[in-house]
Image: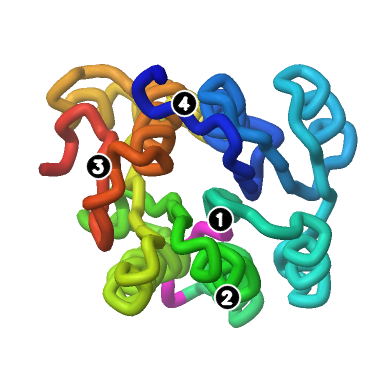
């Protein structure tokens, strides 16, 4: 059997139609897992699902009822990757309640609610992998992203607390914290800002979605069974 083989496992990747989520879904599918992707853009979901051989479920994670429906339609899942996230950037003193609440509702509350719904089936089988996508900014901060940073730092704490509770049932809970990765989001950054960020990265370049996906594949595997409550940093040496 090949390294990090996931044949026979079912994986759900939220925000799986593009960027890092798409790369994760593709990597898990290549490892042999049956993959389900979720998102809000039905056309993008259909395209990605057809491309990688996955199933898709459209769901708006800002709506708790749709989160519950996603869990119900996904069924028994072995691997949950809480990747979906949004930003509503702006200086804290000017952030509206909506900008704050929207980010925490999607980035934190939806991940917690989905995890709670899918965890019992993992516990019953004495095998499960929960992988939460955090961010480098949860560890080093960033101007104008107080709401986003709070959501990602909270996910890190949630990961540690749940890992302690559920380890005896054969379920691991870990984070992957990407740094600056080539995605649609970073492609819109001004060139001067990109160069400034690159100067702070030891590798002197942005990473690729596949770098994050490889880390998720490892944490989802049997080989990572003794790793839980951890954060794997994928940032080219920007934060150590």
For the N terminus, give its image quadrant. Answer: top left
On the question of residue 19 being in view, the answer is no
Where residue 222 appears, as percent x and y from the top left, is 36, 40
Question: Of label 4 and label 3, which has the lower sequence position?
Answer: 4
Q: Nearer the viewer, mark 3 or mark 1?
A: 3
Assess whether residue 92 is covered by the magenta stretch.
yes
Task: Determine the CA span between mark 4 and mark 2.
Answer: 27 Å
Question: Of label 2 and label 1, which has the lower sequence position?
Answer: 1
Q: Nearer the viewer, residue 75 or 127?
A: 127
Magenta stretch: dominant secondary structure: loop
Task: Determine the CA span between mark 4 and mark 3.
Answer: 13 Å
Report helix, strand or loop for mark 4.
helix
Question: Of label 4 and label 2, which has the lower sequence position?
Answer: 2
The residue depicted at 65 percent of the width and 76 percent of the height is 98
Q: Nearer the viewer, mark 1 or mark 4?
A: 4
Q: Nearer the viewer, residue 88 or 172?
A: 172
Q: Mark 4 sits on what residue?
A: 209
The residue depicted at 81 percent of the width and 31 percent of the height is 44
Query: Pointer 3: residues within 10 angstroms few (<14), some, or many (20+)?
Result: many
Where residue 3 appears, as percent x and y from the top left, is 35, 22
Is 144 drawn above or below residue 206 in the view shown? below
Q: Nearer the viewer, mark 4 or mark 2?
A: 2
Q: Residues at badges 1 and 4 in contact (C-beta under 8 Å)?
A: no
Q: Which residues are magenta?
A: 88-93
The residue depicted at 31 percent of the width and 53 percent of the height is 137
């Amino acid at each position: 059997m090949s390294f990090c083989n996931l044949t026979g496992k079912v994986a759900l990747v939220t925000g799986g139609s593009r960027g890092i989520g798409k790369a994760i879904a593709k990597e898990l599918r290549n490892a042999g897992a049956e993959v389900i992707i979720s998102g809000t853009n039905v056309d993008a979901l259909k395209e990605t699902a057809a491309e990688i051989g996955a199933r898709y479920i459209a769901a708006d994670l800002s709506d708790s009822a749709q989160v519950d429906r996603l869990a119900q339609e996904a069924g028994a899942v072995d691997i949950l990757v809480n990747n979906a996230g949004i930003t509503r950037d702006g200086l804290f003193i000017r952030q509206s309640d909506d900008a704050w609440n929207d980010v925490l509702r999607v980035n934190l509350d939806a991940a917690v609610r989905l995890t709670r719904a899918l965890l019992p089936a993992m516990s019953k089988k004495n095998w499960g992998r929960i992988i939460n996508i955090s961010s480098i900014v949860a560890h080093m901060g960033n101007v104008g992203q107080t709401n986003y940073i709070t959501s990602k730092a909270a996910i890190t704490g949630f990961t540690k607390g749940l890992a302690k509770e559920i380890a005896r049932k054969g379920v691991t809970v870990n984070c992957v914290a990407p740094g600056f990765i080539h995605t649609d989001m970073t492609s819109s950054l001004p060139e001067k800002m990109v160069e400034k960020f690159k100067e702070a990265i030891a590798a002197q370049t942005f990473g690729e979605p596949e770098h994050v996906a490889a880390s998720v594949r490892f944490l989802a595997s049997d080989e990572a069974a003794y790793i839980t409550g951890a954060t794997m940093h994928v940032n080219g040496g920007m934060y150590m």
